[in-house]
Amino acid sequence: TKLYTDLPKAIEREELRLHYQPKVDLVTNKVIGVEALVRWEHPKLGLIYPNDIIPIAEELGEITSIGNWVIRTACQQNKKWQENGYTPIIMSVNLSMQQFTSDELVSTVKGVLNDTLLSAHYLELEITESMTANVPATISTLKRLKSLGLKISVDDFGTGYSNLAHLKNFPVDVLKIDQSFIKDLIQNPIDQAIVKTIIHLASDLNLEVVAEGIETSEHYQFLKEHKCLIGQGYLFSKPVDSHTFIEKVHYIE
Ligand code: G
Ligand code: G
Ligand code: MN
Ligand code: NA
């Protein structure tokens, strides 16, 4: 189909976009971070979302070039916001399996930080549990990434085959509670138990915890009451383009 033939040209045609969704401090309600999410503005078919882009990119062997574009663009954008006087925030970037297991990841990230002059302190990389099957390789990659000074978060936490014994040995900083546990949180005592357990686990392991998919003030209140300090979701903002993000969501202090 058209997506297959057009995707390899998408970068040079400057059709890829990043949208940005805020991470909010649930106590102060301030934006403390942002997640970059890739979109493809196809000239004929309109906006294409990652669930359609990523599998095709993997098949075509384009995932590395797209992934590298995402890291570079996200870091450039974050540096630009800082230069324009906005309160510095941490930029999160999702990694694909191929990116995370590639030998080039660490040098790529290092190169981007060097080129963009973004402090590694303002970059966070999101991995999922499913990428961590090779435990020794995972530990080695995470250590090398963290030695650059950036943060690592475990995305969609609780949905993978959560091997807690391995989590113990992974140098990660953040657990992101998957949005599937938040959706029915108020009606479903099982989801409540899971969410409370992840919050306690994170606290005991000295990890930050972020709740995803916060859509209602009831979600917000529950999480705040149970000491989840950071959240993301449509209640605050859906992912938006950089202009909307900076004008409507972020602010100059
Ligand atoms: O908003 P949304 O449709 O963007 O995201 C759908 C899924 O795609 C999520 O699981 C998200 O983590 C993933 N995703 C979004 N942007 C990227 C990206 O730049 N790289 C990778 N590998 N995954 C992404
Ligand atoms: O896998 P990852 O957590 O990166 O996925 C992020 C995805 O979740 C993106 O597709 C994003 O658009 C979507 N998303 C973000 N906030 C909400 C929310 O509050 N509700 C729902 N249903 N989806 C959300
Ligand atoms: Mn994510
Ligand atoms: Na997620």
Image (spheres, helix red, strand yellow):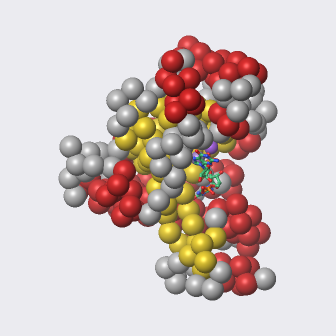
Q: Is residue 145 visible?
A: no
Q: Is residue 33 visible?
A: yes
Q: 229 left or right of 131?
A: left
Query: Which residue is found at the position 74% from the left and 69% from the top?
Result: 56
* Vertical placement of residue 76 versus 167, above or below: below
Residue 120 occupies quadrant: top left
Foreground residue, 35 or 186?
186
Percent x, y for residue 140?
A: 60, 37
User: Image quadrant for the C terminus?
Assistant: top left
Q: 14 left or right of 120?
A: right
Residue 98 occupies quadrant: bottom right
Q: Tally the numbered discs.
A: 0
Q: 217 left or right of 185?
A: left
Query: Which residue is found at the position 43% from the left and 30% from the top?
Result: 26
Q: 10 left or right of 194?
A: left
Query: Which residue is found at the position 39% from the left and 56% from the top?
Result: 245
* Vertical placement of residue 180 versus 48, above or below: above
User: Image quadrant for the N terminus?
Assistant: bottom right
Foreground residue, 218 or 172?
218
Percent x, y for residue 95?
A: 60, 52
Query: Which residue is found at the position 52% from the left and 52% from the top?
Result: 238
* Vertical placement of residue 18 versus 47, above or below: above
Percent x, y for residue 218?
A: 56, 29
Percent x, y for residue 167?
A: 66, 26
Quadrant location, ligand no. 1? bottom right
